[in-house]
Amino acid sequence: MASLSLKHIFKVYDGKVKAVNDFCMDIEDKEFIVFVGPSGCGKSTTLRMIAGLEEITAGELRIDDEIVNDFEPKDRNIAMVFQNYALYPHMSVYENMAFALRTAHEKKEVIHEKVMEAAAILGITEYLERKPKALSGGQRQRVALGRAIVRNPKVFLLDEPLSNLDAKLRAAMRSEISRLHERLGTTFIYVTHDQVEAMTMGTRIVVMKDGFVQQIDTPVNLYKYPDNVFVAGFIGTPQMNFFDGTVIKEGDDVTFNLDCGASVGMKYVQADKVPVKYMDGNHKVVFGIRPDDVRVKNDTNYDDGSWAPAKAVVSVVEVLGGETLIYANLNLNTPDAEEGAIIIKASPDTIVRRGDVLDIEISRRKFHVFDKETEMSIRKRIPEASYIRANVEDGKLTFEGQAFEMPSAVKCDNATDVETVIPISALTLGAGAGKANVQWVENVEGKNLYFLKVGDLTMFSLEEGEARFKAGDIVDFDIDFTKVGIEALGVAPINLTNTLDGTFTKEKDKSRKFYNFYMNVGTAKLIPTVPACEKIFACKGSKIFRTPLEYIFDASVVTVTPHEEGATDVLTGTVSEIRDYGFVRYATIDTEGQKVVAAYDGAVGDQVDLHVPAESIVIKDKSIDIIIA
Ligand code: ADP
């Protein structure tokens, strides 16, 4: 039994191939985690770093709260099962399973008991005397599992264990491994390139591509709420249908105009998670719909307005028995073209032929929308922000019949119809100058996502805990202007992440026997924590003294005090700007030729000392752009 924590894990091979980038994840005891992605995406490398078979370039790996970066594989209490089984060919099954226990000098009776128990769990008792070559692939894989089980490890690591088996056996072994996981009650981490395997086995799945984590979520959430085009296309068979196009809002109607010539229309409330800034008929978007969320029109179909009509011409029909897959095209002139191609999952009694023009219906609830350029979802389960068009009139922000006094920090020229971004965390309910009508409240993983009708628009707010309001309520709301952006007027959310260029140095102490280490920013010297020094030296050795670094810390950790002559372990500077937001004032402080932002009540020109707790400073190696402590 074990929990694992991976913090900013990087793997760089030979100083250049970045195989794994900034892998962060907490794994709870008893989880079944699957790493999935195409070949070369960094799955095995990550698994091998957990096993201790590959050195961790940077980052922190904990097992049960203990940092194990420098532990030998044998001291991590982990068992690994490989694709090629790695059995000893000259030993019997029994000997293979007993081997690790023998080398650990276990008592003979204990070994026998453990081997027999594992053999019984795996159903291989009758093969114990055989040599591996006299076993089938499935049986060999069971022996490999058995060899792991007898050691009673805290964590099971499995690297594509089924890929040498035929399809039928693979399916059987899949459920066997799932049952084994349940029975052993141990943390499993499983690597595969097969999304079906991932979906059927994982309690949570990590989708990777090109060394980067794309999304970490449960199988259901990955399927329903993919974060980007890659995850959307990778998870689910047949693949999601994708269409390039644009979207336009006209009054209460929203229309997705697809480049293939078709269009999908709906009411604004059905698409209101898509930021209105995309609904200008101009922005390139990708409309996605799964084959399961398209249906062939049928007079007996119930429709409460959730289905958009369309037409498609049939190209190929695949009768699979339980269901029929129809490969068609939304452009009726080009049944076989790639553009406009759509796969429809239909009931087995649907009779259609090539060339038929079908009336189909596309779900207005389960569609996906991505930004064409970034390929990120723009119909997220939790929208990032409300995007509105607002006016600025004499220090007031007005939109949809609302008016908010703007604090002096964001005072700007008058303007009309400018795009204003109000992040979901910046819209707070219960007090303030705004009034909204709660349309409904969606529970998203224990949080309440409020859909607020404000004039013609839907705006969003997210709260933890018990829902305080319900559909139909009229609520007051406020806006936190520290987070608001109005690009056209130069109003940007305040960046509270401070990043300072610096170096790491050592100096002999007074006794001339020991070294003191410092985080240097210009002439200022900050004292690092002991764990940070350990991590830095583990990662960089003495190269650290020649490495350009970035010291990163949040404004909230900084304490600002009047400057004192001779103060040590501080950054000293001069306040060059004060941004007053009413409830808080932030100062920009010039120090060592760089800038720091921190909450501060004084005035421009003040000489101040900045106290930054060393344990709150993240250290980044600028030369390879990775976090090292
Ligand atoms: P996956 O398991 O997802 O197929 P890997 O973790 O094996 O991917 O590999 C990730 C990347 O690291 C690939 O680009 C691969 O070529 C590279 N790589 C793997 N092992 C080594 C190695 N020992 N030396 C150099 N590059 C490697």
Image (cartoon, rainbow, N blue to C red):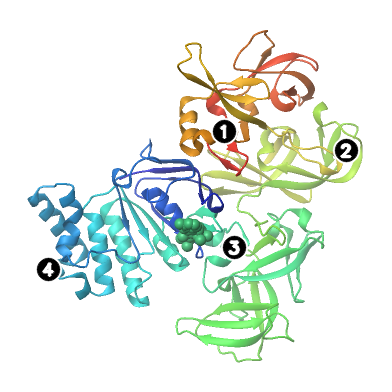
Q: Earlier in the sequence, mark 1 or mark 2?
A: 2
Q: Is 564 on the left-hand or right-hand side of 211?
A: right
Which residue type carries mark 1? Val
Marks 1/2: CA–CA distance: 39 Å
Q: Earlier in the sequence, mark 4 or mark 1?
A: 4
Question: Which image quadrant for residue 174?
Answer: bottom left
Element carrying mark 4: loop
Q: Residue at x 56, y 89 (%)?
A: 351
The spot of residue 32 in percent (x, y) is 38, 54
Q: Is residue 586 above or below residue 214?
A: above
Which residue type carries mark 2? Val
Query: Which label belongs to residue 618?
Result: 1
Marks 3/1: CA–CA distance: 30 Å
In terms of depth relative to the viewer, which is nearer, 212 or 284?
Answer: 212
Q: Earlier in the sequence, mark 2 or mark 3?
A: 3
Q: Is residue 42 visible?
A: no
To which residue does mark 4 refer?
129
